[in-house]
């Protein structure tokens, strides 16, 4: 027992050497200094924040909020303009007008198109007034009818004759109906030659509904007011019903109201100001002209509302400071208890950290291995869907292929198939690279097989057109606002057994080497994508005259667009043509090495930006 007691005293003595009272004093002083600094920093930051918030509110937030509201209105107006232009350029509607509104077939189609604008696109009314028959047709409230025959003697029809002579494709009019207490936007669009139009057609849209939806959306936000003021300064739309029908000068300082009404600021820009009302309340205001009109959109926000959150910030800051002070006191107490054995605690912490690092490292290695294995499997799958070297050796007398994905797998592919009457060669560049690009190549490969088996194999333009339709049908969503942008550029060559050569490209060129030298044959400017559109892309075939011992090359833009050289410029098509001119007489295997060496020498240390594919083959 005496020995154990002596050993414990010795141990306590050793631990007391590690325990340093001066360290505790330093901790206390440090904590007090931190508390003082925290209070000073909190007060200073609140003052700076308040000033910064006011400045940002006036310069950014107010304009952003007003811009969001304005963009909603401008967007609806722009869509109505697009719809009106679509009506005015519709060939069926034009034919019906030219038939003096007597052709029943085109008349039914015209009725359906006007009905679609209201029932499907949600506009309030569509109209069409012929300059040939002066008949005014309208579709509104589920009824399509002939409303009137316009006449120059009728003052109510003055709008039509003014529109006929406006000498521009369309104009936007905002009209407030006092009886209905509604504000309508009318898009008047000329049909035919603007200097001699055959009709006026367009869209009518109730702007009150748009503003009401904006007001409803903003109910849970700041107590802002949205005003719509005509060219004479009369208020037609407002959250506050008392404002309606009264001049803007009744509610704003006269000088400010005059500045808003008579300033001709651009439709795309907002101006912001501030004013104090009779009750002493400060307001921020932003205003702009509605696009293609002289009406003004005004957004008004009380400063007390926009800065109301500062009170919450102050309260939360005080509570946070108190919480931190209490937490620091607790931590100080724990430190004073644990500091008696700092070396042991340091070892424990070090071991805990080391264990965590090892665990995280193991997890990362495991995930990395899984990802790498998946990519390797994807590579094997992609290589299996590409035409094999063995197949190409039986198809071509002499050829070479350079296929170098940027990220193990990629969006470039080549597809070759021989038929009884000829040979079809396809090289494509799908959107993206890596795994997303590889998935696209798999889908496109399946589509190509379907097209050549079920549709046609000897017309490159038709194949591209079918591929464009299938891709959009498969990947385009029904949502008109879908952001899918996937697609591909491709070049297709068909060589018949009689040596007739057809080429068609979607943003793709064919390099041709023959007895006349090396030249580029450019394909169509259209690309193949998933963007929804009304008209399908049209591709054309180009006939390449066959000459003996000619060579054809299909090159993706990963090769031509690769930056390098002393100035970091793209490799470029002209450099490809120049290089081919020098090597075209060589064997295809030698050409492959020359092109690859030229590419590597040009890019030097530059990172490869995209997948690279070049297919070259000779035709006897």
Image: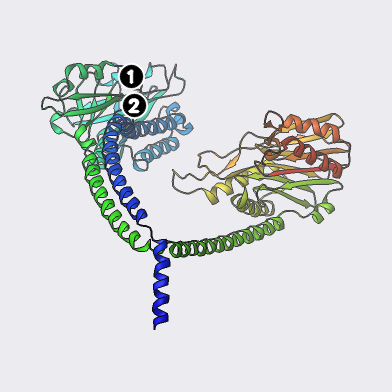
Q: In this view, does 473 lie above or below 546?
A: below
> Residue 293's quadrant in the figure?
top left
Residue in the foreground of this view, choosing between 30 and 413: 30
Q: Which residue lies furthest to the bottom in this view?
A: 1
Quickly name the residue at label 1. 265
Residue 563 lies, in percent from the top left, at 67, 34
Return the mark for residue 135.
2
At x 22%, y 16%, the residue is: 258
Residue 338 lies, in percent from the top left, at 37, 63
Residue 406 lies, in percent from the top left, at 67, 47
Q: In this view, does 216 lie above or below 391?
A: above
Q: In this view, does 363 lie above or below 115?
A: below
Residue 159 in sight here = yes
Residue in the foreground of this view, choosing between 106 and 507: 507
Q: First in sequence: mark 1 or mark 2?
A: 2
Residue 102 in sight here = no
Seen in the image, is 524 located left or right of residue 278? right
Task: Indicate the quadrant containing the C terminus: top left, top right, bottom left or bottom right.
Answer: top right
Marks 1/2: CA distance? 39 Å
- Say which element carries label 2: strand
Residue 531 lies, in percent from the top left, at 52, 42
Task: Indicate the quadrant containing the N terminus: top left, top right, bottom left or bottom right.
Answer: bottom left
- Say which element carries label 1: loop
- Give the total number of marks visible in the rendering: 2
Q: Residues within 10 Å of mark 1 (few under 14, many from 20)?
A: some
Q: How crowded is mark 2: few (under 14 residues within 10 Å), some or many (20 or more)?
A: many
Seen in the image, is 320 located left or right of residue 406? left
> Residue 596's quadrant in the figure?
top right
Return the mark for residue 605.
none
Residue in the foreground of this view, choosing between 459 and 292: 292
- Which of pointers 1 and 2 indicates the residue nearer the eye? 1
């Amino acid at each position: 027992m005496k020995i154990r007691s002596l050993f414990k005293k010795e141990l306590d003595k050793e631990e007391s050497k590690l325990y340093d009272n001066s360290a505790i004093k330093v901790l206390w002083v440090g904590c007090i200094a931190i508390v003082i600094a925290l209070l000073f920093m909190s007060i200073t930051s609140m003052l700076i924040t308040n000033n910064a918030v006011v400045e940002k509110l006036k310069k950014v937030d107010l304009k952003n909020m007003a811009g969001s509201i304005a963009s909603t209105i401008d967007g609806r107006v722009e869509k109505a303009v697009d719809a009106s232009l679509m009506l005015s350029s519709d060939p069926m509607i034009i034919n019906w007008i030219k038939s003096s509104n007597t052709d029943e077939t085109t008349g039914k189609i015209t009725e359906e198109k006007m009905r679609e604008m209201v029932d499907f696109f949600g506009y309030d009314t569509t109209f069409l007034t012929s300059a040939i028959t002066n008949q005014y047709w309208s579709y509104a409230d589920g009824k399509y009818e002939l409303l009137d025959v316009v006449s120059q003697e009728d003052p109510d029809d003055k709008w039509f004759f003014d529109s006929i002579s406006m000498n521009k494709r369309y104009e936007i009019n905002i009209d407030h109906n006092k009886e209905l207490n509604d504000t309508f936007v009318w898009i008047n669009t000329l049909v035919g030659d603007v200097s001699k139009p055959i009709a006026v057609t367009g869209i009518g849209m109730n702007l009150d509904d748009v503003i009401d939806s904006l007001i409803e959306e903003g109910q849970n936000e700041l107590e802002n007011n949205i005003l719509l003021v005509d060219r004479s300064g009369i208020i037609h739309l407002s959250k506050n019903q008392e404002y309606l029908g009264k001049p803007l000068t009744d509610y704003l300082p006269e000088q400010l109201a005059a500045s808003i009404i008579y300033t001709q600021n651009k439709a795309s820009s907002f101006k912001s100001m501030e004013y104090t009302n009779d009750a002493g309340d400060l307001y921020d205001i932003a205003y702009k002209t509605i696009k293609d009109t002289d009406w003004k959109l005004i957004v008004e926000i009380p400063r007390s509302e926009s800065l109301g959150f500062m009170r919450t910030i102050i309260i939360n800051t005080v509570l946070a400071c108190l919480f931190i002070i209490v937490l620091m006191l607790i931590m100080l107490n724990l430190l004073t208890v644990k500091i008696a054995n700092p070396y042991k605690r340091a070892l424990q912490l070090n071991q805990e950290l080391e264990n965590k690092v090892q665990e995280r490292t193991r997890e990362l290695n495991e995930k990395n291995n899984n990802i790498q294995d998946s990519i390797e499997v994807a590579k094997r799958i992609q290589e299996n869907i590409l035409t094999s070297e063995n197949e190409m050796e039986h198809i071509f007398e002499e050829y070479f292929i350079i296929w170098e994905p940027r990220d193990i797998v990629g969006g470039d592919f080549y597809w070759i198939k021989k038929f009884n009457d000829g040979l079809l060669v396809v090289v494509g560049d799908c959107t993206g690279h890596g795994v997303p690009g590889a998935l696209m190549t798999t889908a496109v490969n399946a589509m190509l097989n379907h097209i050549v088996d079920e549709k046609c194999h000897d017309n490159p333009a038709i194949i591209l057109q079918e591929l464009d339709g299938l891709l959009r049908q498969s990947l385009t969503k029904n949502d008109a606002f879908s952001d899918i942008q996937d697609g591909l550029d491709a070049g297709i060559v068909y060589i018949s057994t009689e040596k007739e050569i057809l080429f068609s490209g979607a943003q793709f060129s064919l390099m041709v080497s023959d007895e006349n030298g090396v030249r580029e044959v450019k394909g169509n400017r259209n690309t193949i994508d998933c963007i929804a559109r009304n008209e399908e892309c049209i591709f054309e075939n180009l006939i390449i005259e066959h000459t003996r011992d000619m060579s054809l090359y299909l090159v993706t833009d990963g090769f031509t667009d690769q930056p390098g050289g002393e100035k970091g410029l793209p490799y470029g098509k002209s450099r490809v043509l120049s290089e081919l001119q020098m090597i075209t007489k060589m064997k295809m295997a030698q050409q492959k090495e020359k092109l690859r060496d030229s590419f590597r020498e040009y890019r030097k240390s530059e990172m490869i930006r995209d997948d690279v594919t070049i297919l070259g083959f000779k035709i006897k």
